Image (cartoon, helix red, strand yellow):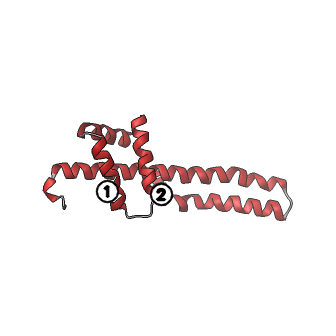
Amino acid sequence: MANLETYVRMAEDELTEYSSEARKIEKIRRKMALSLNYKQQQELKAEVLAIMPQGFLPRLVEDNRQTAALPFWGIAGLGLLFGISLQQPLDFLAPAIALPIAIKIQQWGWKLQAKRLLLKTIDELEQRIKNPETIIS
């Protein structure tokens, strides 16, 4: 599991950089090709596939994490606005509840994106192993 977390963090680090997905995959591919053999890559892929949630909501959060969290950011903002302007301490419950939910949705989407990037990288490694003549130098 520590091995999986290491590679997920590596993918998260690449997500922070402003570059194309192909460039991100290329950078991760180099690191993975040097540190993992084919069998370890397959084990890592199986591990990632086992923990990746399936369904509509995880896919929505992965693709649009900011859009999925937006209603909760709005609720938190409105709660702060009404709590301050109307001097109602009870209105501060909305930000206290909605803000952590919005942050967790963002974090979950970030992790899902990193895992998907990791899967794409492993798939590209497999493709390069199967078709070495397609590699352009």
Residue at the right extreme of this rendering: 87
Q: Give the residue number, with chain letter if any, for mark 2.
A: 16
Identity, as a three-letter code, of the amino acid under mark 1: Glu
Q: Judge by depth and name the residue closer to the eye, 98 or 30.
A: 30
Q: Position of residue 92 (x, y in %)?
A: 78, 54
| Relative horizontal placement of residue 53, taking residue 27 as reference (left or right) | right
Q: Position of residue 62 (x, y in %)?
A: 46, 55
User: Could you tell me which quadrant the N terminus lies in?
Assistant: top left
Q: Are marks 1 and 2 in contact (CB under 8 Å)?
A: no
Q: Is residue 2 above or below residue 91?
A: above
Category of crowding for the residue at label 1, using alpha-carbon neighbours closer than 10 angstroms: few (below 14), some (14–19), many (at least 20): some
Number of the label disc, if any, that sits on residue 26: 1
Q: Position of residue 103 (x, y in %)?
A: 60, 52
Q: Secondary structure at mark 1?
A: helix
Earlier in the chain: of badge 1 and badge 2, it is: 2
| Residue at the spot 42% in from the left edge and 45% down from the top edge | 8
